[in-house]
Amino acid sequence: MKKKRFAMVFDISKCIDCKACTVACKAENNIPLVKDNYRNWITEGPLRGKYPKLGQSYIPGQCMQCANPPCEHVCPTSATYVNVDGIVLVDNKKCIGCKYCMTACPYDARYYNEKTGAVDKCTFCVQRTSVGRIPACVETCPTKVRVFGDLNDPESEVSKLLTKHPYRVEKPEIGTQPFLFYLV
Amino acid sequence: MTLKPSKGISRRKFMLLSACAAVGFGTMSIGKRFQALAASKDIIPLSDLGNRDVFTTCGMCVNKCGVIARVRNGVIEKLDPNPYFLKSRSMLCARGNAGVDSVYSPDRLKYPMIRTGQRGEGKFRRASWDEALDLVVKNLSDLAEKYGRAGTVFVSSEEFQEHFFTTFAECYGSPNTLRHPSLCLSSNIQGFGATFGTNPTPDVLNTDYIIMSGANRSEALITPDSIDMLTGSGGRRKLVYLDPRFTKTAAKADEWFPIRPGTDMAFILAMIHVIVKENLYDRKFVEEQTEGFDKLVPHIEAYSPEWAAAKCEIPAEDIRRIAREFAMAAPKAVYYQGRRSSFFDNDTQMRRAMAILNAIIGNWDKIGGMVPNSQIPLEGHEFVAPFYEDIPERLEANAATYLSEKDGSWKYFRDRVLEQKPYPVKGMMIYKQNPLVSVANREKTLKMMEQMEFICTIDITMNDTACYSDVLLPEATYLEREDPIESLGGIHPVLVWREPCIKPMYESRPNLWIMQELAKRMGDEMSASFNYTMQEYREHQVKNNPEILKALKEKGVYYEKDTPTYGQTIGKKLKTKSGKIEIFSQKYADKGLDPLPVYKHPESGPAGQYRLILGRTAYMTHGTTANNAFLFDIMSENHIWLHTSEAMKKGLKDGQMVKVKSPLTTESLRLLITEKIRPDCVYLSHGFGVLSKGQRLIFGKGGSDAALVEDFVEPISGNMAMHHTFVEVTAA
Amino acid sequence: MTTTITNSKNIIGFSVLGLGTLLGLVSVGYVLMIGHSNAYNLTRQIPWGILISTYVFFAVSCSGLCLVSSLGHVFGIKEFEAIGKRAILVAILALLTGFGVIAMELDHPFRMAIWVILSPNPLSAIWWMGTLYGLYLILLCIELYAFIKENHRLASLVGLVGFVVAISACSNLGAVFGLLEARPFWHGPYLPIFFILSALVSGCALLALIVYFNHSLRGIEMPPEYKKFMITLGKLQALLLGILLFFIIWKIIPGLYEKYPGIYEATMAALSGKLSFNFWFFEAFLGLILPFILLLNNSTRTPFGVMLAGLLTTVGVFFMRYDMVIAGQIVPMRISDGGKATGVLHYVPSVAEMGIVIGSICACLFVYVLIEKKFDLSHTGHH
């Protein structure tokens, strides 16, 4: 089997900030409903213009599944690791709760989960994707902002989208090489 | 569990999988772990009782989207969208995903309860079903004897098992059923119905030009419109949006105009003016399919864009340009009528104007236009209601020009209960409606309930209305119920149903069971009308095509074709008096109403006060979901919105507590200072500021719009008009 | 009479320290009971708080003590030879206290003990931090043993190795922050270097305190060689403070110059924002300028003046660590609320966090004083 490199492409022009992804993620991954506990988010972009001419974007985000993940580098016990599909994961039992990865992540994509006793983050719903399903946030997204797929497969929708459209990634200057792409 | 070696699982992945098996990977629960390891297919067959994937229908709002409930070890773990379900475009919103909590919430009504303290005090004792049901029946019988059968009102709202409740009301003999439309869309149905004979569906998916007036589709989600609105067609799509607030729909619109509230009709009439004057209307269609265009021409003479600009504060050149663009895009252009129309007291006439504008560009029953709803027919449920003598008319009969016999009008009904005229209503049976949160002027609703001798509420949670009731009957939630087949009309008509995912928890029961048990106690004659099981009922519904049941079982949805049919009504008689689209309504003229929409300018508020406007968020369904743990996690209170410039004048700070004072009462809540609202308005979202301590998450959070808003009314349809209230905002 | 006064002084001192320690223990119990997330004011955006900065304070102080004392037994500067044993003892206590504080910060200190060995990540600065300071603790113990046994060969050998490890450990601790590209205020080679210098400052300050109080608390007149040492120490500290002052100035100027996002906001938070009182009063005035003046001036560069300067600097350094840790995290990683919340994030230590910090300081002092009382640490021989 060819190696996979999972990625997600966002068409934020479609995002209506309905938070379906956030709730789907929490329900799918049993995230304790406490402040600060979330794997994905939608932020309201800055309000553009002046009343009565206004504009605003809603920007969904989650772990960028970086190819060069600082969280992996800093973890003293290698609890954070990258799996074969390019997904950055945390091995709960090895996590010592030092939160170094939380300070190292430039995207604020991690939080400490008291229930599991480990730092938690988006796993691209590894329990789903490892059996061929798509992540819960992608499946549920009403306006289909999110596209998930394998970038190593040129026929995948994500590959095609990134070939056809210009895109950006968050904080490219840091060199994390994110695998969440935002169409522009 | 087999790990096929051919899949080439590397050491790392193997470690991941074994970690799953050993200590629970990540936050996966036992059920998910099982799913991750054992499931090679998406769907686990129904034969496995502990673990199954149940095709059912969402019940978190009225859209009824398709859901697959993942049940693992007898627990509903996750709700996923049903990919076969066309109408919702295979999605599930935040509320749909949060549905699990409606089952497992600690604040559920678990057992039948009988009030022990004062009404509203929230003190109840647990009772057996027998005791509770006997008590309800005793009260219903006593009330019938004392006040007659009309002396009990049956309050309910849209739900798959509502039919059994209204059947019970009919069998009991009360003409007084009071439903939700008079808080929502009565005037919309009236305005479009008077014009087209029906309330059509805009073909949002295929249209090129949409104008939305306050229909906030990014937040007040309607499937498939909310999704299709953004789908567009090849970049030609244009969305013009009018709203006093910069909503999330405004953020998606090509153009947003912060229109002065209540002046939409001026904008529409001016558009008609331009289209008629410049001969941009569909002449052939108007001639063949409409009635009274000749009377429209002089009628709109005065309604120029310049005139409208002064009313609605949208520049005349924009109105003119939009009218031209709209007509150019026709017939793939719609003036979207929205759903809730409980804004102003001229709403029916405003919707009439919308309908007329749609009519003259000839978008009727065309692709990308206004399409009359299709419906897949189901066999109706026939029953014989016992005959009672001397049953009067509805309590509020004749109060509105066109009062819906089944739905009634909350405003007029409540007023007459309080007046005790023409007859007293002293009993209240409530099913899945929460009037203390949903009906404007809460004080009046409280008074209405106060004078009731008996109130019984059937619901799933201790909401405000339940808290003020005498007997509480716990209903099973939508995920625990087996529900009848429901025919959802629209451009894509479908059939859906509900299958129970788990057994009803605690002592909750489906409404059919509750009605059957009540009917049994009311006597043989009534009981005979409920003499069937749910299975028999469903089989009867599809007796002409039993294949439907199989399709529903396999896919959770049944549809006859997956493409819409347009033009079915072209050349046929419409359900209006003339059989044509009635631009001029003779029906209205006969009733002494304006046969063509006449503009009425909304009143201005007292100086220093703001018009209170209401609305929705995508995380809340009316007054029913705020206490859901998942949704509370997203939104834990509502704020009063105030424009930056006004807040600056008043020296108020973002996030501070303020007092909002309306002529009715004062509510304290947090202030949100924003550029996203007209400076002469404040906004409050719905569903907070509750009275019941039984909703532990939201009790004490935010403020109640129902308490603040005055109960004005739209007199043609009897719809509540909720945007006529002005408030003061001061530091708390 | 004198004895009574000393005794009552002792009792008061011990009670204060004992109460402080008790407060720390109660806080620890409370945290263990209700869990970190409820007891600490930490968020996902500011995951490191006062416990981390206190740990840094102790760990760097430990390194500093050894670096300064190595001037005696490693580099053979005569005046510094007198204080070797005591410096090592305090260094051990400071490091153990630091470990205690960070154990309270970690959610799973025991897991750490297992997995840093079974699943090490040599790319991680925290892994190196644990390794280096762990190794360092062992070296310190050997060194103390050598001093007690008066094995000078061993002492200076271990001292030499210890010197290298101390510099590695404290500069690596700077690298824990400095390697994070996500945090522009921390990122770069500045912090590792800064940590070496500030370790020296910390070390001098603490040594001044140890030597002064060791005599005054016992009611002993300070012998001339110690007086001479205090004056030398004062001169050295004045030099170090002068350098440190410019280190700080050169942290600020680039922070303001280009308004680089993340650095500018954090610098402004220190200069005029949420951390400005800490910065101007504790860090700059108490910790730097006042001691600098005291030490430069011949009339105030007395043993008492040097002690006072040391005390002020120690307090200043404590706040310096805190400001550094918080300022690095205070700028949010992403905009939210429509860009409305343009400001910096908010963090104030919780009562439990304060309790642990106060407790840790008291416990450290308590144990030190106890050892001083029980054992004779005054230097014998080696003259």
Image (cartoon, helix red, strand yellow):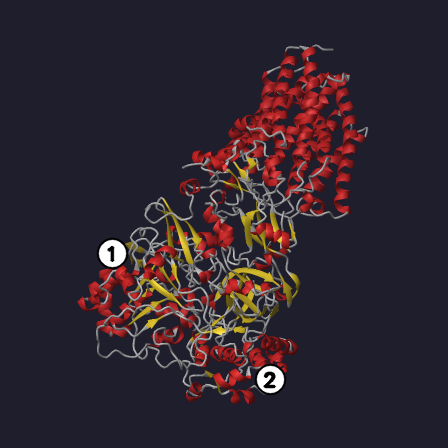
Q: Quadrant of the C terminus of chain B?
A: bottom right
| Circles 1, 2 touching at the beta carbon (< 8 Å) | no
* Marks 1 and 2, how far apart at CA: 68 Å
Q: Which mark is residue C113?
A: none
Question: Disc 2 designates what residue?
Answer: B279
Residue B306 horizontal/vertical position (percent): 64, 82
Q: Which mark is residue B129?
A: 1
Q: Is residue C99 above or below residue B484?
A: above
Question: Which chain hosts label 1?
Answer: B
The answer to whether tags 1 and 2 share a subunit is yes
Residue B283 horizontal/vertical position (percent): 55, 84
Q: Mark yes or no: residue C92 visible.
A: yes
- The reply, left or right, for residue C169 in relation to residue C242 is left
Question: Which chain hosts label 2?
Answer: B
How would you rate the neighbour count of disc 2 (Cα within 10 Å): few for under 14, some for 14-19, many for 20 or more? few
Residue C79 horizontal/vertical position (percent): 76, 18
Disc 2 element? loop
Residue placed most toward the observer, B250 or C9: B250
Q: Quadrant of the N terminus of chain B?
A: top left
Q: Is residue B229 above or below residue B295?
A: above
- Residue farthest left in this picture: B524
Residue placed most toward the observer, C10 or B557: B557
